Amino acid sequence: GESVGLHLPTLSVQEGDNSIINCAYSNSASDYFIWYKQESGKGPQFIIDIRSNMDKRQGQRVTVLLNKTVKHLSLQIAATQPGDSAVYFCAESHRTGGSYIPTFGRGTSLIVHP
Amino acid sequence: DVKVTQSSRYLVKRTGEKVFLECVQDMDHENMFWYRQDPGLGLRLIYFSYDVKMKEKGDIPEGYSVSREKKERFSLILESASTNQTSMYLCASKDSAMPQYFGPGTRLLVL
C-alpha cells in the first residue's frame, strides 16, 4: 500500500544554519506534494507545494525538492530561526475519484537552538 | 485569507455522551475533512466530504459520523463518546488539487 514516511523524527539545528527535512513516499501515482508546519497547540499551516512536473520550487527561505526517481521529497529552510521550531509534515496526493485526498507523513520535529 | 474555524478549542465530555464538533470555512471550498491527531500517529482521516450532503469514509470512521447540510459547514459527531476518542480533532478544507487549510483544532477529553 501507499505510505508517506520521514527519515528523522527529530532534527536539531543551530540558529542561522540551514535545515533539511526529508520525506519518502511510495505511491508512484502521487502527483501533488505539500509541506505543512504545525506549531504547538495550532493546526497545520501550508508552507509550500510542488507538482510532479517540477523538481524544485522556492518560496521565502524555503525550497522543496522532488526526486520522482527515488520517490523522495525534501524541505530546505535557509537561515533557520527559533520561530521555525515546529513539527513539519509532508503530504502526497493523487486524484481519487473526483478529488485529491492527501496522505500525511508522521512528522519531523525541528528544534532550533539559539 | 482562508479561514477555517472550529466551534471549541477544548471540550471535556463523559463516556456515552453524544458530542458535536463543528467546522466552518469561509472560502467556498468544495472539500472538507475531519482528522484526529494523536502522538506518534500523525494525522488520520476520519471522514471527508466533497459536496453538500456527500460524505466518504476515511481511514478510521468507526465510532464517528458526519453531516454536511451547507457547503461551509462540516460537523463531526461522536454518537457515544468513549475514552479512546480522547484526541486532537482537526478540520480542513480545500479545493481540488490545492493545499488544505486547517482549523486550530479541538482538544477533546473523554472521561
Image: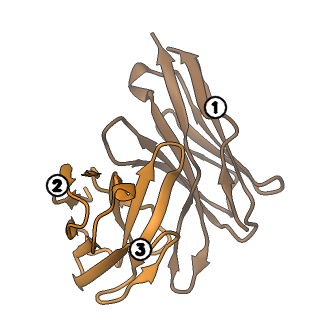
Chain colours: A brown, B orange
Badge nearest the viewer, 2 or 1: 2
Question: Could you tell me if residue B70 is visible in this image?
Answer: no
In this picture, is A43 found above or below B35?
above
Q: Which of the marked residues, 2 or 3, is nearer the chain's N terminus?
A: 2
Q: Residue furthest left?
A: B7
The structure residue drawn at horizontal position 38% and vertical position 69%, both measured from the top left corner, is: B33
- Image location of residue B46, percent across then percent down: 43, 69
Q: Position of residue A15 (x, y in %)?
A: 50, 14
Residue indicated by mark 1: A20
The kind of residue tagged 3 is Tyr
Q: Secondary structure at mark 3?
A: strand
Furthest residue to the right? A69
* Along the line of sight, the residue nearer the viewer: A14 or A104: A104
Mark 3 vs mark 1: in front: 3
- Dot 3 crowding, Cα within 10 Å, few <14, some 14–19, many 20+: many
Badge 2 element: loop
Looking at the image, which residue is at 27% across and 75% down?
A: B79
Contact check, label 2 and label 3, Cβ < 8 Å: no
Q: Which residue is mark 3?
A: B47
Q: Amino acid at mark 2?
A: Ser
The residue under the point 41% across, 75% down is: B48
Task: Look at the image and tell me in which quarter the N terminus of chain B lies.
Answer: bottom left
Disc 2 crowd, CA 10 A, few/some/many (<14, 14-19, 20+): some
Residue A87 placed where, x, y %?
48, 37
